[in-house]
Amino acid sequence: MPTSLPNEATEGEGARPISYAYKASLISSAQQFELTDAGLSWRIGSRSGVWPYTDIASIRLSYRPMSLQARRFRADIARTGGGRIAIVSTTWQTVSLMTPQDQGYRTFITELHRRMKEAGSKASLTGGIGTVSYATAVVMLALLAVAMIGLLGRALATSEFTGALFLVAIAIWFAWTIGGFIKRNRPRKYSFDELPETLLP
């Protein structure tokens, strides 16, 4: 049986740090994070550090599904002067199992924002993917929709009802998966008081 990755995202008595950990790949070691009085403490492999909350320059929240885990969220955190880390809501356990850590991830990210606000952070807070990437995805989806409508019309005109049903099924699948990705990842800015619900588990 796979062993569970130690992952604590609850705050005990006093000033006990809030922690979160995940494995980015099956063969990698766990990436570990803590919210301490000194700032965001992290350990990735042999590297480690502590970023004061006021030194965090930006946070980007996004929805990043994968083939093995459709419910996957990510936070990209950048530090003033250089340095980036990524925190995702899933962890690898076996070759075919990527486990969600919804509650731990949500608690950790929410508390990170709270502590940054309390410290007087001026960080840039954005949600979704970049504007150019988003526009490209929307255009590609629109072109695909036009092509599928054309194929569906041709199939119906030639009485290829089996093919038409197949196209309808494909269209529904695309609307559910790709449409959901685009809807969640709409570029936006948010505040410390109002985190985007669609970008949190």
Image (cartoon, rainbow, N blue to C red):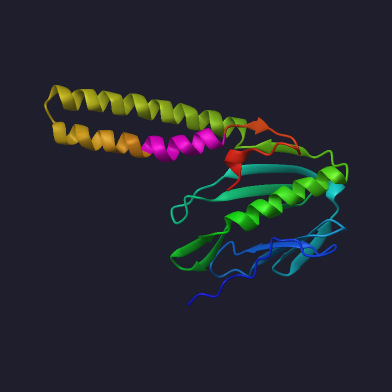
Residue 131 lies left or right of residue 181; in this view the side is right
The answer to whether any part of residue 80 appears in the image is no
186 on left or right of 165: right
**Residue 175, magenta (yes or no):** yes
Which residue is painted at 36% across and 27% down in the image? 145
Q: Quadrant of residue 19?
A: bottom right
Q: Position of residue 113 (x, y in %)?
A: 76, 46
Question: Is residue 69 left or right of 79 when viewed as pictured?
Answer: left
Looking at the magenta stretch, what is its main secondary structure?
helix
At x 66%, y 48%, the residue is: 75
The quadrant where residue 39 appears: bottom right
Residue 44, position as x, y percentages in the image:
70, 64
Depth check, front residue: 101 or 54: 101
Q: Percent from the top left, x then y, of residue 201? A: 58, 48
**Numbered label tally:** 0
Residue in the image at 27% along x and 23% along y: 150
Q: Residue furthest front?
A: 13
**Rendered position, 154 above or below 61:** above
> Of residues 152 and 198, which is closer to you in this image?
198
| Residue 198 located within the stretch drawn in magenta | no
Residue 192 pos. (x, y %): 76, 39
Which stretch did the figure color magenta? Answer: 174-185
Name the residue furthest bottom. 1
Q: Residue at x 70, y 34 (%)?
A: 190
Is 153 placed above or below 98 here? Answer: above
Q: Is residue 77 left or right of residue 161?
A: right
Q: Is residue 168 visible?
A: yes
